[in-house]
Amino acid sequence: MSSKIQKDVVVKIIKSAEPEKLVLPIPPRVDHADHIIKTALMGWTKLAADHVLHPEFAKNAREIFSSLIRRVEQMLKSEKVFDSSGKLYEEVVLRRARIYDTLFEIVFNLGGVESKWAGYSSEDVENYIRYLTNAMNYFETLEREELGYPTIMEVVVELQLSELMKVNKGKSLVAKVAQDVSKSIDKNSIAKSYINAMLNQIKTLFYRKAYENGLCKFGNDYALGLRFLRHLGFVQVSTNPVLASIAYNDDPELLEKFKKYAKEVLAKEHPEWFKDPEKYADDIAMEATRFALMDNFYVFRVPFILSKYHDGLVSYQLNPLIAHDAEKSVEAVKVFATRLEKDLSVYDEYLWWGYNVSEKGRPDLVVKVAAAYPAAMEIAERINEMGVGQNITVSFTVSQEVLIAFAAIKGMAKAIRKGIIPTQTYDTNMGGRLEDHLREETAAQLLLKALEKADEGKRNAVLDKLAKGLGVKDDVWLEMKKKDLKSVANFLCSRRVLGRNLLRDPFVDALVELGLYGSRDEALSNLQPLEEALRLSGTFVAQRVYEILFAPWNKEKWINYLIKEFGLTRDEAETVMDRIDLLPASKRKPVDTLYTFASRNMTNTEFPDHQLNVVEEVTKKSISLDDLRESIYQQLPRKYLEILMQIEDFVKAYEASPEVNELLRKVGIDRDYGNRGVSPGDWPAYGPSAKTMHEFTDEYLAFRSRVVEAVKKL
């Protein structure tokens, strides 16, 4: 006779249960199957699932999976959810849920690119997935017989999908996948339909195909949804104060978990923080960020260790308030990396239990260093020499990206000369933010020029109409009108008001009404090519940086320079140059990704909704993978470059600076890349740098205030 269990009861049991603390030494384990089961039952289901991703496991997987499935079946048959009087055994519900969660994750690991990283053959993967799917289907049958309906299994599936649906509040590729999968689940065969639907997504999505065909590597500009993206081949995640704050906003449970952690752990380790939270505000913010990112570090342990520190990196941004100070920044890196290594050493003991792993605990960390300050060069060199990678940020120009890349290269060369294998490092190109800045400045100049042609009455009438057309609230506009004309133009032409398009009707109409253009057709004939040029501005810079550093005819010169300058062997010099990627970021539209594919030294990092836009663009236009191969080398229309070269801030971004040219001469690169690029001393005042640092600082202060207030309440 079966007894039913309510879904909300199961959800409560699962969500209220905390994972056990990972401790050393690890409690006794008999073998790998036993280790997976015991780790899963501790509440570390994803860790247990990732244990199968090692070459030593792959060699003996047939026997281990046999043991795992047999033992799970014995456990499920021997434990009843209700006793004879109808009392619910909550611990049995939880154990089943954790086992189901683990087995689903193992299947998705095998179906993802991870199985290839671990050395599984395609034939073996197919067989192991078949065994596990059949086993899960059987476990579902057992639950139906006992309870009348497989409520526990259904809840596990729904909770897995709900985690994916949180990503960017549902506006993401990952959330779209979860929505599509949920529609494919058959209530009469939950496990099998769920596995088949999820594997179909994992195997057929564009990013998986692009990665496996060697077109490019990919990263995520967001702290959630990484495990699913890892299945597709994503090997990097970028974070900053903005994204840390978003993670806490999008996952309300995260702040509550941090409060609990602060009360139970931080209060004991750092009682001084709780006596005077304001004094230790930056320390608390650093720990809150680390706490939010820990799952990111866990997710990427597998590719990081298996690739010998080449893939699987988590970018952590330094406190922007000290980004100009090399000593304070390097010290902050040491503190963060030391604490992180302590935690990861324990995690790795469980992840790699029973395996021969050369180094455990090494942080899969790259530190985001703000290129808004010349100090970034010293910071990049020093932390790379420590074996910690870097990811420059607030970087828009050839000058910033080449000079700081070289600083990182020097650091890696010093590290490898001492015998330290360097960690992958990144050279970010924030093309979207450069594009935003150039559009804002260009639009404001056009509007001001048009306003000069009109009398005061005409100006006021047109500005009122423009503000209304762009959706500015009345009270905001009343205050803004009191400011000078330049401030008004800058406000109306800002990204937050005008958006990312010069061709918006209210703006075009305003320029025509003010007499800058004789007709709407004339306005569009001038603005359309300008808008198209602006949309390619970041890509033009990315192409130039990639050519300087990584084009075969230049990369060979860098390798020879490293051999001569630092006394490296050729293999060592090639390793250094192989461990730095250009990282196109802050994407605004699909072509920002599709135009920057390269099989070597390239990782495209992107926001969750941008990934969805890319997939839809590829599908809509039937773009083939071959069309995208090495697209970083494609010739963009010369007419757009000629338009951009009339914009001073683009010239500063696109051309080399005197300092870059001096470096290139030493390396032996003699091509003319111009000489009007922004010099290091001018980086802080360069428009996009100043704007971005202002935004990052404001976001950091807001995030810091939020977590400090949480600590105060404790």
Image: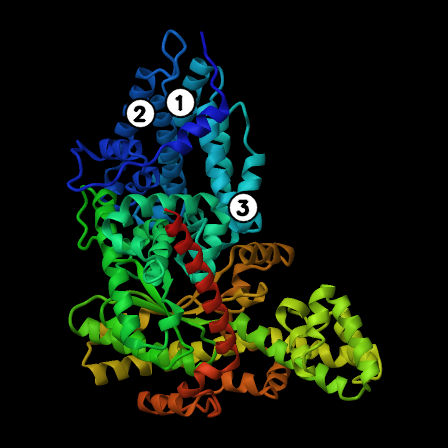
- For the point 26% across and 39% down, the residue is 21
Instruction: Give the farthest residue toward the front.
Output: 275
Callout 1 secondary element: helix
Q: Earlier in the sequence, mark 2 or mark 3?
A: 2
Task: Sort mark 1 into few (<14), some (14-19) or many (20+) by Cα contacts within 10 Å.
Answer: many
Q: Which residue is mark 3?
A: 175
How far apart marks 2 and 3 lie (CA) works out to 31 Å
Q: Does residue 528 lie above or below 471 as drawn?
A: below
Question: What is the three-letter code of the residue carrying label 2?
Answer: Val
Q: Which residue is mark 2?
A: 72
Callout 2 secondary element: helix
Question: What is the three-letter code of the residue carrying label 3?
Answer: Ala
Q: Earlier in the sequence, mark 2 or mark 1?
A: 2
Task: Sort mark 3 into few (<14), some (14-19) or many (20+) by Cα contacts within 10 Å.
Answer: many
Q: Is residue 265 left or right of residue 402?
A: left
Q: Does residue 706 lie above or below 106 as drawn?
A: below
Callout 3 secondary element: helix
Question: What is the three-letter code of the residue carrying label 1?
Answer: Phe
Residue 681 position in % (x across, y down)? 40, 87
Q: Earlier in the sequence, mark 1 or mark 3?
A: 1
Disc number placed over residue 139 in the picture, else none: 1
Quarter holding residue 217: bottom left
Q: Is residue 391 left or right of residue 268?
A: right
